[in-house]
Amino acid sequence: MKRNIAIDILNQTPLEQQQIELVERKCLGHPDSIADGIAESISQALCRNYIDQVGGVLHHNTDQGEVVAGESLPAFGGGKILKPIFILLDGRATKEFNGEKIPAEPIALKAAKDYLRTILPELDFDRDVTMDVRLGTGSTDLRDVFKPEEGTIPRANDTSFGVSFAPFSEIETCVREISSYIDNTLRPKYPAYGQDIKIMGLRQGDAIKLTLCCAMVDRYISSLSEYVDYRSRLQEEATRIAKQCTKRSVEVSINAADCDKECSLFLTVTGTSAEMGDDGSVGRGNRANGLITPHRPMSMEATSGKNPINHIGKIYNLLSSDLAHECVKKVDGLSEIQVRLLSQIGMPIDQPLIASVQIISESGVTLKDIEKDVYEIIDYGLENITSITERVIKGELKTF
Amino acid sequence: MKRNIAIDILNQTPLEQQQIELVERKCLGHPDSIADGIAESISQALCRNYIDQVGGVLHHNTDQGEVVAGESLPAFGGGKILKPIFILLDGRATKEFNGEKIPAEPIALKAAKDYLRTILPELDFDRDVTMDVRLGTGSTDLRDVFKPEEGTIPRANDTSFGVSFAPFSEIETCVREISSYIDNTLRPKYPAYGQDIKIMGLRQGDAIKLTLCCAMVDRYISSLSEYVDYRSRLQEEATRIAKQCTKRSVEVSINAADCDKECSLFLTVTGTSAEMGDDGSVGRGNRANGLITPHRPMSMEATSGKNPINHIGKIYNLLSSDLAHECVKKVDGLSEIQVRLLSQIGMPIDQPLIASVQIISESGVTLKDIEKDVYEIIDYGLENITSITERVIKGELKTF
Amino acid sequence: MKRNIAIDILNQTPLEQQQIELVERKCLGHPDSIADGIAESISQALCRNYIDQVGGVLHHNTDQGEVVAGESLPAFGGGKILKPIFILLDGRATKEFNGEKIPAEPIALKAAKDYLRTILPELDFDRDVTMDVRLGTGSTDLRDVFKPEEGTIPRANDTSFGVSFAPFSEIETCVREISSYIDNTLRPKYPAYGQDIKIMGLRQGDAIKLTLCCAMVDRYISSLSEYVDYRSRLQEEATRIAKQCTKRSVEVSINAADCDKECSLFLTVTGTSAEMGDDGSVGRGNRANGLITPHRPMSMEATSGKNPINHIGKIYNLLSSDLAHECVKKVDGLSEIQVRLLSQIGMPIDQPLIASVQIISESGVTLKDIEKDVYEIIDYGLENITSITERVIKGELKTF
Amino acid sequence: MKRNIAIDILNQTPLEQQQIELVERKCLGHPDSIADGIAESISQALCRNYIDQVGGVLHHNTDQGEVVAGESLPAFGGGKILKPIFILLDGRATKEFNGEKIPAEPIALKAAKDYLRTILPELDFDRDVTMDVRLGTGSTDLRDVFKPEEGTIPRANDTSFGVSFAPFSEIETCVREISSYIDNTLRPKYPAYGQDIKIMGLRQGDAIKLTLCCAMVDRYISSLSEYVDYRSRLQEEATRIAKQCTKRSVEVSINAADCDKECSLFLTVTGTSAEMGDDGSVGRGNRANGLITPHRPMSMEATSGKNPINHIGKIYNLLSSDLAHECVKKVDGLSEIQVRLLSQIGMPIDQPLIASVQIISESGVTLKDIEKDVYEIIDYGLENITSITERVIKGELKTF
């Protein structure tokens, strides 16, 4: 069956050339990102276990969960957690299939803890965290719709959609690169930089302003002056990285709410504000591409934790992002592209009700010049949509 | 100080004239909306109590919470709840001020239950729901920033933004009106229509397709044929209401996942799918204007439950919506308007870093024609921004 | 089959004539008694529901549960609860039988709340209490043993025993009568007397000392002097009641830990110390006869909440108490009697491994004089053992 | 001040010579013992931490807590946990002292997990257990009474008592020795024997019957026949140990509820029935001497978890046991001794209201023969009562 793919040229100013642009990223240790990461880890662990136990992925959606903040008393040289963080794991999962019992809750607990250990190594799991797990088994209506069959294309769980864009703008790239640089290069060298970082980027014309809120880890910092040094180093490093991504003017400020005199700083014991007041939820932070982009089209769906088989809110968001970037990479003349995939409940997911592609082309480039190439990329992507599922299960795709 | 208000004309096709449009509304009994409504009720109750006890609203943010589904066994004529719904109330609140102890957790519990009683009258509170409350006291950093002072303008809690648009498109109006009609007219007459309704609208060119998932309440329905009658009645009524909102073709389908033969229906004991499998979270459903509009700019912030004093994620979302609609109402020649308000942490909230207004004007209307009027509306709205706070506390503004 | 009933005369000083005697009662509002009362209410509610739904009582044991104290700020004229009491309901129950689903957790919640409302009318259920329910379904081993069959005698769930004695000594009677008088006569007139009362009785020779710790309800008391008046009134009334039960000297002290000067009093908002620091558990308070009697033989089993069909820890404790009192009432010459019933797992409960009766007889009374009468009472009681079950289900027997 | 020590000779048959005797022990992995062990571990950890942080032990009582069973699917060769065990930690503790914040909840969590790891090594903490901690801060009344002062004797927290006896009877010794042998000798060699063992001993005349319910660990047992072998080995070993303790006839039965044909066995994944249906609570199992002895005087107080400074329910139970055994060891002619220590609230704990010693002496031994020696032992013990506290904190005394 021919796919319903509509490609249009928008007569519109690309975001990169508009006056104002805003972008935000909540890095891995932000409470909302913690919730997202746990939710996705649980889904992946369930997938792997389902395959092991029954040879196929069963229905589940663990795109739920709440991180309830604890209380802490950070101090230079090392403070303490006074009240543990509480994490509620919910959502639903299949717990029995063909007479086989599946230990969904123990799997969820294990996945959540394993994940947390990798992103918050300062957290003492024996002291500082409690978890509860309340995985339901889902309502019969929706579950019945879902039947995993080998070789065949799953049917959409819902009438829903996914949306994404490409390429990243300069400021979006700045935010992504700084996040990545801190995680991969800076922190391994300086563990004083915690995992809970919020990066806010604002561009007004050609002036880029980046605001980082970065939790500092108290045990690696002996004094206020050392804290100030760390802040300065981060300011310099972030500025340097940003300047590699843009020719525009860049101003970076770190922990703007700090008041050095009163020693009111963003100092933490574990590297996340979840230790002292900030709760987090699944689906409240970054979109599937790792950013919050209020000037871009966004899906409200929580990508993390949803089942990667037939949940449109997950698959179409990931796929549309892939396709948009693929088009930009392979087709010349695209200033900006938006891809929207709209499903129809009960229909095969490779046959969206409509795949709508909106392009802002470079000067002189017409629809005719690019239509065929773009169509082929979209069509091929849809044909191979189950590779998204496979990559999700292998943990190869980021969801937040 | 003069406010930084930027007004631009966009050279763009209004959404109403674009080929595809998507809109969704999760009505009051949807698990995500339940979570939102509880969160907002708690904030309002805390506000009223703070004023009573200490003469001013204290810091709090209760924009958190999780509704964990129970298990039910619906049956024509009346089924039963097998496992209670569990609701976690979290967020944070000030619990002591000037030596005065504030019973924040009991207030939260009471507010949550009072609210639930109004929207889910079929729910038996003694049997079918359990609640836990874990309100933290917030981190000192952020709390220090917030000092409620009479007569003065509060300072922004964060560098953040609010965004909205006007007017509603035809299909958005359809969705809103149907929701409202069911709640205010249909259900009072036919309690068989539950509160958990999801309305999805898709417009392709001039064809509008509305999909309603409506929980039916089992005790008011004696048989499959009566269920089918109710479904038909809703189909007719929703179609009728929609046709009052648009001249376009309208197709309405109700509970498309029903399978009458296998009696797999959207039947519930209490009117919400939270009873049997669907969890809900704050901030995952409707935006502040009651809709999810993937083709419109949206804020990811949860409006419900945030403190209405200085939390930009609440105030600017509500204000921008107000201002957009005010402009459309009072200024001729506006096809579409988007209002974005961007704050700067620590600065008075009536002085946004920038108030950016983007207008798609009617044919022949220039910026000059409308600039002054729009400016005045925006400026006046910002000057009187604390009236938003007051209306929120009085419960006059909807947040989801 | 002849029952194995052994009757012996003990050559021993009756407790009433020993030098020292100690007795304690935790009244209805004591946290441990709250837990007991809830546990028993749940069991009774389950029994009634099982009978309604499936025509027989199914396996359950709800002799578990924890009352976690809240925080309060009592004040003359009316204080407030700052943090709700949390109550965990656990144990296990049958949730499915012959394809019929039984809503065990909703039943438990409802029973717990209904019970609490009767004993703690000052408690605001919407604000001051949260509950969680985690009823398991039991391990297969034990469950298999239990098969409720009409007309036949259930088989013992365990090798266990029940024990009791009669008659009550003077000081035991004092404690029981005072408790009863406060509940039935004094509080209806003076609601200032809360439900959480601990009565400790110590007899040294012929001197009886009674110590009452009685929670006072703040909203009914306007000042310290009124509090002192209430204390005095209770002291007088308790003394008066005690003197009706004994000719020995009686000294009563009320709230001995009070320090009037510092206004450190036993003042509460709701009438129970569970509001401010005292946790409670099932099975930690009174024995089945309503008393803690360290000089008497006692069973460690929690009578409350156990199933009344085949759980020896419940049935034999209740029956042995009944039988001991029956003997004292009907047979002359008994100074003191102890009845121990020992079961054997899997055997019919009317056939204990041994029913051991130990008697301290009045001077001149021999075994021969009383043996036959006692035997008949014991034998008849065992023959009609299922009437204990019936009376428990009807709520006619107290378990703590 | 001279201590009030009363020593009497009882004219009574020692238990060893009575016709019937019953004794029970719940070994370390029994759900009630798990709860006790956790409670005591928490108290000890708090003590050590208080001393480290503020130089003295602060008020706390963690003699509360609930072990809520999970669900499991044991299988020869290794089964799985389907639903985690949930453990609620409650009680109360001082969380702030002289401006110093004490992380009571994290300490409690850590202590609970460390303890569980030692007794249930098969339990996977990442998968199979969840914990919640809800430690209150206690009511002001009781807390005020307690002031830890160096060199001085603490004052009793309550009017309460402790009681114990010596020596252990033959059957009591059998039970204790078998428990000890399994833990120290048998299990290190055969990890198939789980930690959850209940040993019930019944003596009728000279016939001793011991019933062991021993959880078997599935991963160490490959088949029913191997299970049967393990059961036989335990039967033989227990019989052998028992025969070392008594000349009476001994009959031992293991897992009497097993039904080999239906393969309904006491097989577990982790070695405790808490994995599949049996809840546990603090204070519901063994008394301070490790036994439940319905024919002996017992205290209902939970010894485990209570503060070892001034809580009579802990200190007097431990001390009375120590003193009773000391007397039997050092003074000739004692058949049986019972020691009861009765406190008076607010008085120094070395000055009980009365220390009542009741002795059944050997034939021909008069009060005069033994009175002085016994008095001195009791008096010396009371004088050095704080050594009990010290040994508890060091973990040298067992409490269950």
Image: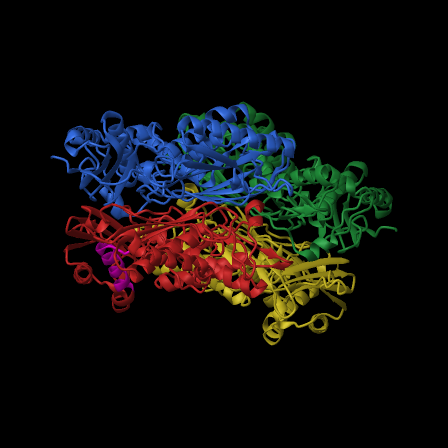
Chain colours: A green, B yellow, C red, D blue
Question: Which residue ends up furthest to the right in the rendered image?
Answer: A1
Q: Camera-side residue: D279 or A217?
A: D279
Q: Is residue C354 visible?
A: yes
Question: Which residue ends up furthest to the bottom in the rendered image?
Answer: B189
What secondary structure is the magenta-colored segment mainly? helix
Q: Camera-side residue: B335 or B286?
A: B286
Q: Where does residue B82 sit, x and y in percent of width and height?
A: 58, 58
Q: Magenta span has C142?
A: no
Q: Camera-side residue: C58 or D103?
A: C58
Where is residue C377, by image quadrant?
A: bottom left
Where is residue D322, by image quadrant?
A: top left
Above or below, A338 against B396 in this view is above
Above or below, D286 against C270 in this view is above
Q: Give the range drawn in magenta.
A: C167-183
- In the picture, measured across the screen, residue D132 lies left or right of residue B149, that is right
Tell me the quadrant of the picture where the C terminus of chain C can be found.
bottom left
Tag count: 0
Question: Which residue ends up furthest to the front in the rendered image?
Answer: C368
Q: Residue at x 22, y 40 (%)?
A: D11
Q: Where does residue B390 sit, x and y in percent of width and height?
A: 44, 62
Q: Magenta span has C178?
A: yes
Q: Where does residue D356 sit, x and y in percent of width and height?
A: 20, 39
Q: Can residue C65 be seen in this view?
A: no
Q: Where does residue A162 sit, x and y in percent of width and height?
A: 71, 49
- In the picture, measured across the screen, residue D381 lies left or right of residue A227, that is left
